[in-house]
Amino acid sequence: MSKELKLKDGSVVAIIGGGPSGTSCAINLKKESIRMGIDLKIVLFEGKDFDYLYNQCVGVLSPPFERILTNELGVEFPSHLIKRRIEGYVLYGNGNKIFLNGNENEGPTYAVRRIEFDNFMLDTVRRLGVDVRKNRTTYVEFIEDKVRIFGERGYLKADVVVGAFGLDESMLGVFEKATKDSAGYKRPKRLLRSYITKIFARDDFIDRKLGNYIYAFIPGTLPNVEFGAVTPKKGHIMVNVAGRNVHSTDLIEFLKLSKVMELLPPSEESGEPDYFEGMFPASTSQNPFGDRFVMVGDATGWLRPFKGKGINTAFITGIKAAETMLKKGISKKDFEQYAIQCQSLTDDYVYGSIARNTTHIFSSIGIFDKLIDVARYDKKLYDGFYNAVSGHDSYKNIFKKIMTRKTIFNITKGLIFSFM
Ligand SMILES: Cc1cc2nc3c(=O)[nH]c(=O)nc-3n(C[C@H](O)[C@H](O)[C@H](O)COP(=O)(O)OP(=O)(O)OC[C@H]3O[C@@H](n4cnc5c(N)ncnc54)[C@H](O)[C@@H]3O)c2cc1C
């Protein structure tokens, strides 16, 4: 069976979704298939017009995204997309804060406008000659040796389909149904909800108040908010909160915190903000591939917990899925190679979840502020905070590096003294 499931001249690959996972998959497929001398037909379906409809995002591109773009996709990141080059972070507990600066060994961090970034990626795909169709798909069937993809503006018969539609509720349901009697794809069970608002401000105000820093909050006083952030852009500031049980009213409460208010312009200057809502996966999906289908990006749930770096996960999964399809094949067995190649994403999951849960507990019982004090003189804990907030290192490595006798001693001493 798996022998027949190979891509060859004339094979059709359908990609549903033109976000970072779908576009990176399309770019890699197109370039590599040409290099390998396979004449593929690649069709990418995207329902949104990125000139005015966007995917919810703060728009922070974290390392090593630039290296992935350049080295793995051969795409040069255009500097005109950069709204800010982020130099560091300020991490807030309830009543304490610390500036976190690190090195840029892994590459720079940029704040961009997501709509411009998505437009750039989709244009790159078009320029390479991929057939990009502005068509929202509605249904998928696996019949005989083909995948049938139905959309609002037409139908396609393909050899394999790539699920790059993020957490689109209806597509998740369609794939669960279509694969029920075969591979049995199941969406990520747990999701983190996020509310986001854009606050307009003059650039001189942003430069003076925020500079090129992202302000990350673990506000133990707002029980539904696992984390919040204030991110400087050009002409505006993004504020977002996230948590499993967060509501829009939590964002309003977050905006009222004095430490948040002092970073924002007085309300008469900023005007009435708009609120948007989005989701992050907070657990992995089940069976994200099978004969003739593979999930990439958010639909896999292979996102780094906490500091998500979802765009990087989307790139990595998109690229590795393309590589596997070309070099191995399009059967369930072949895609096991894809899962192995993405193992570093899933391996960190348990460590990230521990970091997320302990931070939340420590913050609500007041211990987090004490840890910030310890990080002022313990370099390993300081680096751990920096790497966790910036996403520069895996949680597994962060834990490994913190677990030294000296740091454990410093943390224990700091906690004992603070309670005396
Ligand atoms: C509030 C918020 C802030 C975030 N901020 C950041 C950040 O700053 N940095 C970061 O790295 N990550 C961030 N993320 C996560 C990041 O946005 C995602 O992890 C990433 O975009 C996932 O990429 P994707 O390609 O899998 O899905 P998406 O980016 O969601 O793309 C899916 C695409 O598929 C299209 N689509 C869906 N259904 C269909 C259909 N039926 N037919 C055709 N097209 C369809 C959609 O229109 C969309 O364009 C944030 C997420 C949220 C919710």
Image (cartoon, grey):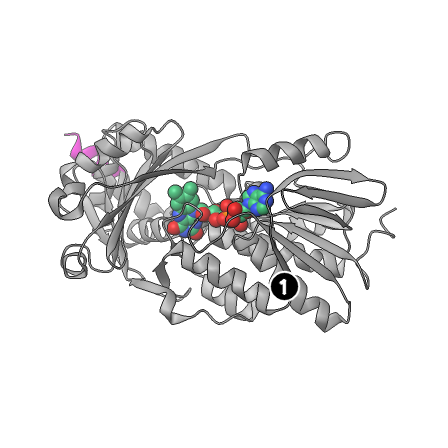
Residue bearing the label numbered 1: 28
Asked if residue 150 shows in the view, the reply is yes
Asked if residue 399 shows in the view, the reply is no
The quadrant of the rendering that contains the C terminus is top left
User: Who is closer to the viewer here, 253 or 415?
Assistant: 253
Horizontal side, residue 119 vs residue 373: left or right = right
x then y, percent, for residue 127: 58, 69
Who's the residue at 72% across and 54% down the image?
13
Q: Magenta region's main secondary structure?
A: helix
Identify the element where label 1 is drawn. Answer: helix
User: Who is closer to the viewer here, 305 or 39?
Assistant: 39
Q: Amino acid at mark 1?
A: Asn
Who's the residue at 31% across and 30% down the image?
248
Relative to residue 50, is residue 358 depicted above or below? above
User: Who is closer to the viewer here, 324 or 220?
Assistant: 324
Q: Image quadrant of residue 206?
A: bottom left
x then y, percent, for residue 134: 58, 52
Q: Is disc 1's CB within 8 Å of ligand 1? A: no
- The residue segment tinted magenta is 412-420
